[in-house]
Image: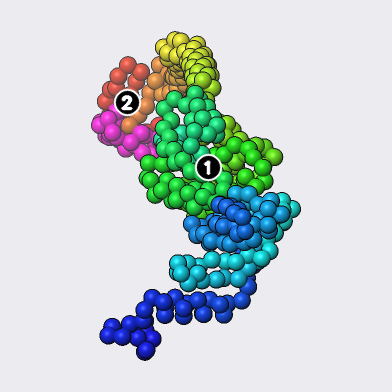
Amino acid sequence: MTSDPSTSAEAPWPVRTVALKVSKWIDRLGPVWVEGQLTQVTARTGTAFLTLRDPAADVSLSLTAPAQLVRSAALTEGQRVVVHGKFSFFFGRGTLSLRVDEVRAVGVGELLARIERLRALLAAEGLFDPARKRRPPRLPRCVGLITGRASAAEHDVVTVAATRWPAVRFRVENTATQGVQAVPQILDALDALDRDPAVDVIVIARGGGSVEDLLPFSDEALCRGVARCRTPVVSAIGHEPDTPLVDHVADVRAATPTDAAKRLVPDVAEETAHLAQLRTRARRALHAWVEREDALIARLRARPVLADPLRTVEVRAEEVAVLAERGRRTVARGLEQRESDVRHLRASLTALGPAATLARGYAIVQAGPDVGSPVLRSVDGAAPGDVLRVRLADGAVTARVEAPE
């Protein structure tokens, strides 16, 4: 930072010189239009002193205006206005003030038009997108509540939530909920609750009011502050018809503070009844399952194979015995048949064999005395003096050939 070369630690400017230079520099500024909210209106005999505050920041500006102008415009504290004037520096006190020569009250229609323009802007940026909204926890450990001190909204939220779920805890941040102090205080409380790791959900609650009373909840800075929160935010502003912009930015919009309390925690009586119903359904389902399985086991046990496991073996044993008996009879019949065949064959062999022939008086003559001698078939095979073996029916004799015949 550079200083004026005409000044130094050895040759400083006196206060009057600095004040004069500042006054001349400010005089070169042209007139401006400024919008804000009146926080103080003091109308004296000739001059009125006013304070104009930015509704979204802790910044204010001192105004001076003709008292007649203030009376004719019927200005009151808390009113939104647009003023026209020129800055002036009071040389004696070293203060800056805006000398006002025209005041225009901001009407409801114009306020609503500005809110609609801001609504379109925020919607275009995606702050209203349902995809970015988060679902609050079903059973929050701690609820952060931003509301007016000792307000009906605080009473409704805390009382209804504690009645529905007695274990719920609250961290309450009391702030202004209308006027120029509302937005800065709500933003500070919102930031403090968002940084608290114990807070699971944040509720911004306020009762009903006029359009002017609910203006802080359509402020751009507050909407963007809610959008930046990492903790889910529930908006419960006014009544059902009231829809400030923060309702669209918040993760959950409640119609009233009471509705917000109902959305925060479940009803312990309803949950107990629901749990009892689930237990009853589970018990019935378990009993039905056991009955089905028991019936299945009974049917399985009633099957012959399980009712009398040896019955199948016995049936098969009977079948085996029948088959074995049938086999024995078949074999016996076969043996009898074969024995009969053998007897027939034996009889045939006996009838056709040599023994039967020998028994009828015939004999077998062998050309030699040995058993194995060949059978003599012709007289030419025997010469006088040969020893022959003659086999008869009951034995054999030896004979000698005398002469052939």
User: In the picture, residue 239 is in which quadrant?
Assistant: top right
Task: Report the side of 137 relative to 257 (left or right).
Answer: left
Name the residue: 60% across, 49% down: 77
Q: How far from the left and from the top, in percent, is residue 55? A: 56, 55
Residue 116, placed above or below residue 396: below
341 or 335, which is in the foreground? 335
Task: Say whether residue 371 is visible.
Answer: yes
Q: Which of disc 1 and disc 2 is earlier in sequence?
A: 1
Using the rendered view, name the quadrant where residue 220 is placed: bottom right
Distance between the Cα atoms at labels 2 and 1? 149 Å
> Pointers 2 and 1 in contact (CB under 8 A)?
no
**Main secondary structure type of the part rendered in magenta:** loop
Left or right side of 197 for 336: right
Q: Nearer the viewer, residue 159 or 71?
A: 71
**Residue 247 appears at what percent x and percent y?**
61, 46
Callout 2 amino acid: Val
Residue 309 at x, y percent in the picture: 42, 13
The answer to whether residue 332 is seen in the rendering is no
What residue is rendered at 44% in x and 25% in y?
A: 166
Mark identifier at residue 377: none
- Magenta part of the chain: 368-390
Disc sitting over residue 390 in the figure: 2
Q: Outermost residue toward the bottom?
A: 5
> On residue 204, which mark appears?
1
Q: Nearer the viewer, residue 342 or 164?
A: 164
Residue under the image location 32 percent in, 25 percent down: 390
